[in-house]
Image: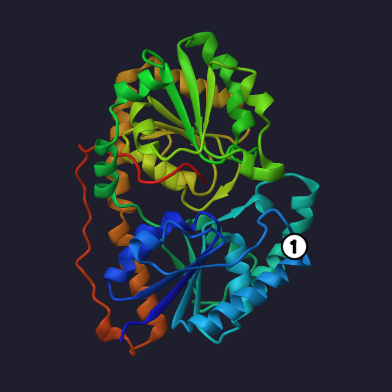
């Protein structure tokens, strides 16, 4: 009999479909639960149940979500529960309360520990208290980077021996490459957007202040003063980002040098046409998937020196790290890479092998399977297959991503 794993996440949970499919191949019966509508799961034969919560709200209103999760768990009767994302990581252990083993993955500490706003500062002790409470009913806490693990250790928010480091949710390099080559060519994409001869700096993610969009916009005049043919392409949701969204007027002030495309399903092709990936986040990330996708696309990266980013970008080797909110530093590194294209190409090529070796989906899923088997004990050990891990090290293949703009 296969163990039943219920995986709970937020509105971007569909991006974990490859992860869930890989778990199913290894012998798990998988059900997804998220705040997404769930249409993306059906074509893959993954059952999906929806529960609602407001990711912008704070306070007592989320107790309704706790009740909803508790009811779902009584209906689904899982053997083990995996949670991702800030609120599901807090709400799920509080709902289950030890009746089923819960594994929570801390994929970044988010706005509360990134913002300097008074409200964020005031919420930090509350967040720590809730994390400590949730840990009482958590079988194991997975961290995607060492900075977050060190933070939890420092404030004793996780029990001794109940922490594990697994970098990222994984990415399938071969599927990523196949998606890139099935899409339009770089020349076709450039022509469609009117960017035939431009030097393209691309950002993929939520168009919010926390993701550093104001810093990127502030860097635009400096970059244009030395690279007048530069164009900034922003890919990702804006209207859905509530109080965190960057205003349209802020972005449109530099049109046509800054182009906001909104959410797109052809991100592989968009990455394939770019010259450089900029990620000036102010957010405490887990391991940003967009950096893995940019890396597989062979793009040099300029990112903020923030947790998660520094796990993917080695300063001066496959890109550059700059201080968050440092528009001048960001502009200088962008100008430098655009001015020395040979060096930029070498830098970008290094990321391909790094992502394939350190963050491949197969390797990540193997680690989760080992963890689940440990937590479940010997009951299901014989029913869980374990294919030999495949770690690809070649550096030559370019490849963009499956899926849509977000994060």
Q: Nearer the viewer, residue 239 or 362?
A: 239
Q: Residues within 10 Å of mark 1 (few under 14, many from 20)?
A: few
Picture layout, residue 386 above or below residue 406: below
Picture layout, residue 38 above or below residue 327: below
Residue 62: name its quadrant: bottom right
Q: Nearer the viewer, residue 19 or 161?
A: 19
- Residue 106 is situated, as x and y percent measured from the top left of the image, at 53, 62
Residue 27 visible in the picture: yes
Q: Nearer the viewer, residue 159 or 216?
A: 216
Picture layout, residue 217 above or below residue 286: above
Residue 167 visible in the picture: no
What colour scheme governs how the chains and residues are painted in the rendered image of this protein?
rainbow
Q: How many marks?
A: 1
- Residue 25 is situated, as x and y percent measured from the top left of the image, at 27, 69
Residue 5: name its quadrant: bottom left
- Residue 193 is situated, as x and y percent measured from the top left of the image, at 42, 21
Q: Nearer the viewer, residue 403 or 208?
A: 403
- Residue 341 is situated, as x and y percent measured from the top left of the image, at 33, 19
Kindly state the secondary structure of the residue where label 1 is placed.
Answer: helix
Residue 265: name its quadrant: top left
Residue drawn at the location 45% of the way across and 79% of the way down = 80
Residue drawn at the location 66% of the way across and 52% of the way down = 113
Residue drawn at the location 38% of the way across and 37% of the way down = 266
Residue drawn at the location 55% of the way across and 35% of the way down = 280
Residue for badge 1: 125
Q: Quadrant of the N terminus?
A: bottom left
């Amino acid at each position: 009999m296969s163990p039943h794993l219920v995986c709970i996440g937020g509105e971007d949970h569909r991006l974990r479909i490859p992860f869930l499919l890989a778990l199913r191949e290894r012998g798990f019966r998988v059900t997804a639960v998220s705040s997404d509508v769930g249409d993306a799961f059906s074509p893959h034969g993954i059952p999906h149940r929806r529960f609602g919560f407001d990711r912008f709200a704070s306070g007592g209103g989320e107790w309704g979500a706790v009740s909803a999760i508790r009811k779902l768990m009584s209906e689904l009767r899982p053997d083990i529960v995996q949670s991702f994302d800030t609120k599901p990581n807090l709400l799920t252990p509080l709902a289950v309360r030890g009746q089923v083993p819960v594994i929570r993955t801390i994929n970044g500490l988010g706005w509360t520990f990134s913002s300097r706003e008074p409200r964020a500062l005031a919420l930090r002790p509350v967040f720590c208290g809730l994390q400590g409470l949730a840990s009482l009913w958590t079988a194991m806490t997975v961290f995607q980077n060492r900075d977050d693990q060190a933070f939890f250790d420092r404030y004793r928010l996780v029990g001794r021996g109940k922490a594990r480091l697994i970098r990222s949710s994984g990415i399938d390099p071969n599927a990523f490459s196949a998606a890139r080559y099935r899409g339009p060519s770089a020349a076709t994409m450039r022509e469609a957007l009117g960017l035939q001869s431009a030097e393209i700096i691309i950002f993929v993610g939520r168009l919010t202040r926390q993701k550093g969009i104001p810093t990127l916009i502030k860097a635009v005049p400096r970059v244009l003063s030395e690279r007048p043919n530069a164009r900034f392409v922003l890919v990702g949701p804006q209207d859905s980002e509530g109080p965190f969204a960057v205003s349209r007027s802020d972005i449109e002030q530099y049109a046509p040098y800054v182009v906001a495309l909104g959410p797109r399903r052809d991100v592989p092709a968009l990455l394939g046409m770019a010259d450089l990936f900029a990620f000036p986040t102010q957010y405490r990330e887990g391991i940003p998937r967009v950096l893995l996708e940019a890396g597989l696309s062979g793009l040099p990266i300029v990112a903020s020196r923030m947790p998660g980013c520094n796990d993917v970008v080695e300063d001066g080797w496959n890109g550059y790290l700059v201080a968050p909110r440092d528009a001048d530093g960001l502009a200088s590194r962008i100008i430098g890479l655009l001015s020395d294209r040979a060096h930029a190409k070498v830098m970008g090529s290094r990321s391909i092998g790094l992502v394939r070796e350190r963050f491949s989906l197969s390797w990540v899923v193997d680690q989760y399977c080992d963890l689940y088997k440990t937590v479940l004990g010997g009951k299901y050990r014989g029913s869980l297959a374990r294919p030999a891990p495949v770690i690809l090290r070649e550096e030559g293949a370019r490849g963009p991503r499956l899926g849509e703009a977000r994060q």
